Image (spheres, helix red, strand yellow):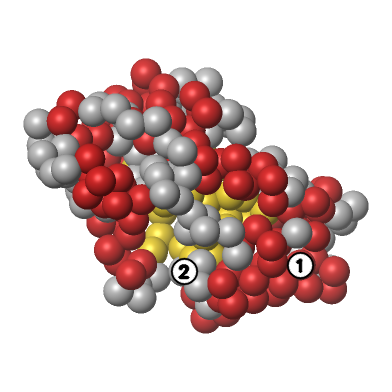
Amino acid sequence: MENLLRKKLDAGEHVFGTFAELGGANSVEALGASGIDFVLIDNEHNPAEAESAAEMIRACEKTGVTALCRVREISRPAVLKLLDAGAGGVIVPCVENADQVRELVDYAKYAPVGKRGFCPSRKDGWGFTYPGTLSVADQMKYWNHETLLIPQCETVGCLEHIEEITAIEGVDGIMIGPFDLSIAMGIPGQWENPDFKAAIARILKACKDAGKYAMVFTPTTDNVKDYYAQGFDIVCYSLDAAVLIAAYRRILEEIK
C-alpha cells in the first residue's frame, strides 16, 4: 500500500498528526476522519501491543490516513511486527548512539540497506496484493522507500551524535522529543533556555544537511506554524486523550 505521508513529504508538503493514546480502533478511525495526515500509534507509553496496533492500523487505512507506530524498545520484534502489520513507519524512542541506529536500520530496512526479515504479511495482503505480486527484489526496494524509520532525539547521547546518526543510510528522519530531551539536558520544560534552543537548531540542521525529514512533538498549536517556518517537515500535536479532555472542559465552561 502506498505511503501517502511519504508521498506528501516527497512533494515538499508540511504534514500534521497526533498521538493515539486512547487505544481503540474506533477512536483512531475518528482521528482519520478529521483530515489529519497521520496517526502515531504509541507502543511505548500506551498499553497497546502489536495485536491491537494492527487493528488501529486497519482503522487508519479505512480513512486514508497514514499509521505511524512508536515502538516499545530497540529490538527486532518490536520493529518487525509493526511494519509487517502495515505501519507506514516506526518512531524509535531512547536512542543513545549511532550503533543503536545501525541496528535499527537492520531491523527496519531490507537488503541491501538493512537485514529486515522477509515474509508476506498483512502489509501486502500476505503476498496477494501489490507490491506482494512483484519480484522479491522489487518488493524490498519498494518497502525500503515506503517505510519510514525515524529515531527520536530525546537523550544527550543522541544529541551529541546527531550528525553521525542523520548521515546513516536507512534513516529517513529524526523526531525531537522535547520533554525528555530537556529533562536529559537538566533543564526540564525550559523551552526558552538558550541551550535547549541551540539543541533544537542543531538537530534541525543535521537533518537538513543530511537530506532527512525533521519531526517535532508539540503539546500546543501555538508554535506549529513557527516550526514549519523553521524548516520542520512533520509536526505531531498533542495526543487524542488530551484533546478530548480539553474539548469537553471548554464545552462545560460554555454551558455553565
Asked if the residues shown at circle 1 and circle 2 are in contact, with their CB atoms under 8 angstroms apart, the answer is no
For the N terminus, which image quadrant? Answer: top left
Q: Nearer the viewer, residue 120 or 42?
A: 120
Question: Which residue is most to the bottom?
Answer: 229
The spot of residue 151 in percent (x, y) is 58, 49
| Residue at mark 1 | 199
User: In percent of the image, x 27 and y 63: which residue is there?
Assistant: 7
Residue 215, percent from left and from top: 53, 61
Is 73 placed left or right of 120 in the picture? Answer: right
Asked if residue 180 lies left or right of residue 149, the reply is: right
Residue 232 visible at all: no
Which residue carries the number 2 mark?
233
Viewer-nearest residue: 94 or 226: 94
* Vertical order, 211 against 101 (above or below): below
Q: How many marks?
A: 2
Q: Position of residue 187 (x, y in %)?
A: 87, 56
Q: Amino acid at mark 1?
A: Ala
Amino acid type of disc 2? Asp
Q: In 3D space, how far apart are the residues under numbered discs 1 and 2 (Cα atoms)?
A: 17 Å
Say left or right for 184 vs 58: right
Q: Secondary structure at mark 1?
A: helix
Residue drawn at (19%, 35%) of the image: 124
